[in-house]
Image (spheres, coloured by chain):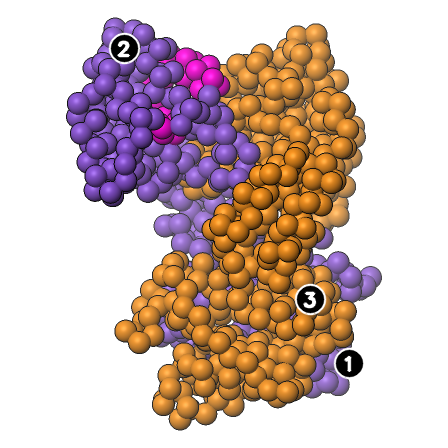
Chain colours: A orange, B purple
């Protein structure tokens, strides 16, 4: 089954918005045993017509993203219908969904939105709970003119992803005759790099019959993806966990922060954070997890030295003597957060994010990480490679959360 | 001049490797006043032939990446030469460059590498100081069969980027001449939606001669992109700012947090934050901006009621009487943060992120936003659409930062 993807959007080709759709579709389809034969990006407007006309002839399935909005540059619906010679009609179901969306939010619906209820005759309306643009599915031979199954999907990931899994996947399975035999398992690791896998277990993974595998390296994280029949996946897991089990974040796709929150909830333990260089990122990651409020109570972003002193009781003389980025200050921040919050654990970080502020002795990328609990504190120093400010923050937050994860699985 | 891009590589379509080439080329070309008409990704191997055959007929310039390596799935060179009916010969210059590359590294050259010295007759060899694969340039009418200028470039960014700037840009300039240089302007707005633009100025924008425009809706933000000659852009800006000027975040691509940090620095004013439902996101966004430490000193993540009381002095009786998500508590949090930090401004947020915790009176999505300064406090209530937790946090942080932005541009 030849699957092609057409991404529409001028912003994708200007480079303002990174086009992550190609890779995302690739991963989803791969997990179903399907492959992408071609991916095409064109600007909004008439360029869609040319690309669509070629692709609909060549492909068995065409997934199109973008151009379903209410404004004048959203032309995908009209171009597809015209090219296939299908009439558009105002669809009652689509209209009701649209009216419901606006009513729920107490916003008046403008006439332009009515275009979003126009549906090619014979097409299925795919509900979009996260936006105004419903998706559309045009089955093969909808008007006898094309053997290609065409999906029109919204561009924004928060709208696209749920619609893909809820509406597209079941139809693709039916089209492809896919049975659920092959599975996928994703193991997330931290504290080791992709090269550790290459050196350590890559050759042995390759020996496992019927196992496809791949790595995805993120900041402070390596994801190992295993695809195959249950026995092949089990053999791959056993191998990976045997070598790197203590670095495992999760085997179900859960993030490090979700793992930490789960472990804290299981043990009914409370956490506080005291952040300098990460500037609130650790608290932000923790509070992205539903239920965080049961275990995370207090966070400080003591960006200024004076804040470290007044809020966490770090002596100004200590900061003067050792510098704000020091073992002593990291320890005192964690102690102070533990004392002020009354929590069971407190994490602290202080470091030099750059671009300025580095010295010979403490280069940009240096960070001290603390973990305090009632029995005392652990403090460790890490030097991260020079990198962009946000990436440094992400790397430090990952190390800090992993300090606690390792403590909790002891 | 119609420029198309062909990215080759199975890994790009499996999603293991994010395809950043499309956007990268877009930005480089745009800076030269050029645009990408279409971007196509195909797997390694024969799929390249089909895509190349179509694109070389349609485009004036074709930029191809990948498939120049020494292994059996690196077929770009051969497919391009065959399709255009050009002989390949072993090129002395390419061979010398290749030998030099290996000699420099003390690695023996294997026979497979000799394929990399095969060059279509009439093509220019583009040196690659960072890898073994030289690039190739096939000028238009190289054999009288195609009017398209074809560049064959290596896939890895560290090889591609220097070759593009050193070898491709000068040739593109010559091909393009200098006449059709358009500019771009991106205006970011907040506090209004895409439909406000459609309602308000879309029709008038469409009337401006030579102006291309488009919208990109993000959470709590709409970006308006204007493309054209300077007069057309100026007319578009005037129209947009005339209607929505007070909602403008920036006209140079700067984020809301960067705009707030810039305004604070210009006025030498200090900021503190007191966050409940956003859980550190506001502090995190602010500290992503280099130079934030000059103006942002203290942040609190008072997730638990007890933290609001002990850290910010919010009376527990007030929380009991009005609830943690209330006008009174938002006001007291902002007051407390201002007092504790000694800053000039303090932002506070308290709300219900969900999925649980909503009531009839205070549904999920309700948030109270405070802004305190020495003269007093402003507090406002917002109800955001039901949405994912992270999106709710982003929407609330956007509203909170915009409260301060509007105050600072008064």
Whole-number angstrom distance, CA of label 3 to CA of label 1: 27 Å
The answer to whether residue A34 is above or below residue B337 is: above
Residue placed under numbered mark 2 in the picture = B87
Q: At which x and y percent is residue A240? A: 62, 51
The answer to whether residue B350 is above or below residue A376 is: above
Q: Of discs 3 and 1, which sits in the foreground? A: 3
Q: At which x and y percent is residue A352? A: 39, 71
Whole-number angstrom distance, CA of label 2 to CA of label 1: 84 Å
Image quarter hosting the N terminus of chain A: top right
Disc on res. B320: 1
Q: At which x and y percent is residue A153? A: 63, 31
Q: Give the range drawn in magenta.
A: B46-70
Q: Does A391 sit left or right of A165 as displayed?
A: left
Disc on res. A261: 3
Residue occupying the point 24% across, 15% down: B89
Chain of the residue under label 1: B
| Callout 3–callout 1 Cβ contact below 8 Å | no
The secondary structure type at the circle numbered 3 is: helix
């Amino acid at each position: 089954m030849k699957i092609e993807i057409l991404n529409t959007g001028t912003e994708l080709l200007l480079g303002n918005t990174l086009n992550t759709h190609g890779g995302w579709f690739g991963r989803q389809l791969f997990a179903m045993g399907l492959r992408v034969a071609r991916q095409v990006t064109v600007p909004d407007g008439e360029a869609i017509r040319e690309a669509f006309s070629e692709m609909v002839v060549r492909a068995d399935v065409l997934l199109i993203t973008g151009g379903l909005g209410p404004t004048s540059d959203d032309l995908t619906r009209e171009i597809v219908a015209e090219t296939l010679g299908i009439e558009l009609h105002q669809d009652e179901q689509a209209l009701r969904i649209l009216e419901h969306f606006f009513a729920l939010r107490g916003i008046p619906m403008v006439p332009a939105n009515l275009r979003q209820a126009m549906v090619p005759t014979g097409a299925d309306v795919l509900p979009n709970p996260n936006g105004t643009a419903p998706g559309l599915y045009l089955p093969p031979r909808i008007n006898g003119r094309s053997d290609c199954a065409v999906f029109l999907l919204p561009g924004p990931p928060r709208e696209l992803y749920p619609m893909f899994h809820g509406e597209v996947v079941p139809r693709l399975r039916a089209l492809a005759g896919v049975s659920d035999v092959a599975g996928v398992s994703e193991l997330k690791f931290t504290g080791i790099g992709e090269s550790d896998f290459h050196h350590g277990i890559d050759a042995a993974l390759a020996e496992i019959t019927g196992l496809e595998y791949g790595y995805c390296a993120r900041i402070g994280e390596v994801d190992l993806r295993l695809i195959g029949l249950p026995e092949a996946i089990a053999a791959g897991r056993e191998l990976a966990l045997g070598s790197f089990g203590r670095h495992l974040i999760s085997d179900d796709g859960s993030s490090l922060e979700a793992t930490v929150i789960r472990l804290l909830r299981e043990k009914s333990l409370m956490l506080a954070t005291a952040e300098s260089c990460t500037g609130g990122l650790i608290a932000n990651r923790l509070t992205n997890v539903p239920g965080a409020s049961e275990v995370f109570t207090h966070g400080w972003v003591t960006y200024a030295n004076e804040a470290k002193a007044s809020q966490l009781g770090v002596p100004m003389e200590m900061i003067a003597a050792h510098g704000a980025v020091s073992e002593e200050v990291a320890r005192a921040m964690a102690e102070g957060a533990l004392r002020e919050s009354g929590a069971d654990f407190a994490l602290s970080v202080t470091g030099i994010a750059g671009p300025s502020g580095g010295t010979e002795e403490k280069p940009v990328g240096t960070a001290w990480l603390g973990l305090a609990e009632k029995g005392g504190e652990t403090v460790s120093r890490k030097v991260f490679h020079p990198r962009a400010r946000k990436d440094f923050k992400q790397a430090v937050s990952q190390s800090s959360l992993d300090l606690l994860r390792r403590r909790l699985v002891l």
